Amino acid sequence: MLIKKLAVPFINDKLLQQVEHCYIATAAISEAGFDFIRSRIPTKTKMEIVTGLDVPTSPEVLRRIWRNYQGRITLNIYTRNFFHANVYIFDLPFRKAVAFVGSGHFTLDGIKDGEELFYKITDTKEIENLKSWFIGYYEFGEPLSEELIQEYEYLYPTLKQRDILSRQEKKQFISLTTAGFSWDQIKFKLQYFKKEDYLALSSSKARLTNPEILTERENVKNKLIQLHALIKDHVHRLKLKEDHDSNQIVSSLNPADHQDGKLRSMWIAYGPSEAGLKKINPPATFREVMQHQIILQQKEVGIWLVPGKPNAGKADRESFKNKMNDAEYRKQFFTLLTSLGAGYWIEIAGDKKAVETFQTEDALWEFTKADDWMHYAFIIGKNYSPADAEISSEQITATIMKEFDKLVLVYRHMKDAGEEKKM
């Protein structure tokens, strides 16, 4: 029997409440996926799990299993080869059993939200064969240990970053080649940024440094500087400043200065003044603080509030994380964020969600807990496609000023948290 969503029999048939013992082989585990199953099975039910860690698995869920479920959950790591199997076997009362073999990892996407496929098995002989298969990998796995978790924690950010970049590149590729997108259908005559500006940031040119592509990037830089001249008075009234070094107003044109050595975007940024940077204890560089950005990418223009890129924004981001423990602060942040309106999203540790999808401040709080200033970006923003009237030559300055007026309220709320910590 084919099953598209594993959550359906788990919930509708109340299957998990009957489980007496479960065996799970999976390519990856997430905290949400683990909680989905663990919270629904009886507390005395034992779980045996084998995974390969070839697909990023949260170190936090490994640590939770190690610290909180000794004797009830045993997890082994299969290291002899790439492990990508996903098998769920459940022993039920009266010597019955059921198994599911399919594509979904032990994550919420794999169980409920993603497009997966499973085959349900109830035949006793087939289930015994699956258990024998499971034991073969489980017994050859390395037992979970504190030392293993510590070493994996050092490796995990690299695995996660690769996964994030891969997903972003795939999304860019899909958006450029499907859904009827065509550069030729856009009336660039009316738009501030032209086709050649976007193509200067194409994937095929991202690593190049030849004279032709450098000229293209210089042209984009000049276009951004012209835009800066049009909006700077308004930005200064918001008590935001560009980098005091006039040569740094626009981001670097050298791919080596960008993530993964690929120049896929260019931007202008605004943050504290030079005097404001010196007041921070210890003094911070312009790159290390929260910024408003106007960013040009291969197929879109973004107006963003960036609390920090990877390895940046430590003071602001750590202070914000601490302040989110306060219920009133959470409520105010939730109100400010969701009032930004349609089109806005928040990105934490590679996961991006539309602001209107958060129904409560606690749901938003839970999402922000994944922030890690050392390894991932934290962005709140809104993107426009090349054809949007809001970024036409006539309207782009008004659009930027309007969106900066909204984002600066979020900025001040978050910045106040940072300033309080630094005092």
Image (spheres, grey):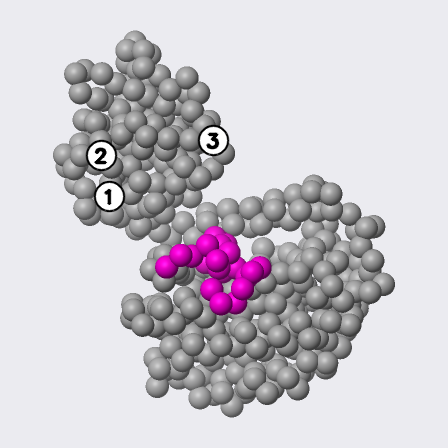
Residue under pointer 1: 65
The answer to whether mark 2 and mark 1 are in CB contact below 8 A is: no
Q: Nearer the viewer, residue 324 or 158?
A: 324
- Category of crowding for the residue at label 2, using alpha-carbon neighbours closer than 10 angstroms: few (below 14), some (14–19), many (at least 20): many
**401 to the left or right of 314:** right
Q: Which mark is residue 41?
A: 2
Q: Position of residue 324 (x, y in %)?
A: 33, 68
In 3D space, how far apart are the residues under numbered discs 1 and 3 (Cα atoms)?
A: 26 Å
Q: Nearer the viewer, residue 375 or 331?
A: 331
Q: Position of residue 88 (x, y in %)?
A: 33, 26
**268 to the left or right of 20:** right
Q: Earlier in the sequence, mark 2 or mark 1?
A: 2
In 3D space, how far apart are the residues under numbered discs 2 and 1 (Cα atoms)?
A: 15 Å
Element carrying mark 1 = helix
Q: Which mark is residue 116?
A: 3
Q: Nearer the viewer, mark 2 or mark 1?
A: 2
Residue at image location 28% in from the left, 22% down from the top:
135
Residue at image location 54% in from the left, 69% down from the top:
305
Q: Nearer the viewer, residue 298 or 154?
A: 298
Q: Earlier in the sequence, mark 3 or mark 2?
A: 2
| Amino acid type at mark 2 | Ile
Q: Earlier in the sequence, mark 1 or mark 3?
A: 1
In 3D space, how far apart are the residues under numbered discs 3 and 2 (Cα atoms)?
A: 22 Å
Residue at the outermost right position:
189
Q: Position of residue 296 (x, y in %)?
A: 68, 63
Element carrying mark 2 = loop
| Amino acid type at mark 3 | Glu
Residue at image location 47% in from the left, 64% down from the top:
338
Residue at image location 22% in from the left, 34% down from the top:
41
Q: Which quadrant of the rendered structure holds the N terminus?
A: top left
Q: Which quadrant of the rendered structure holds the C terminus?
A: bottom left
Picture quadrant of residue 252: bottom right
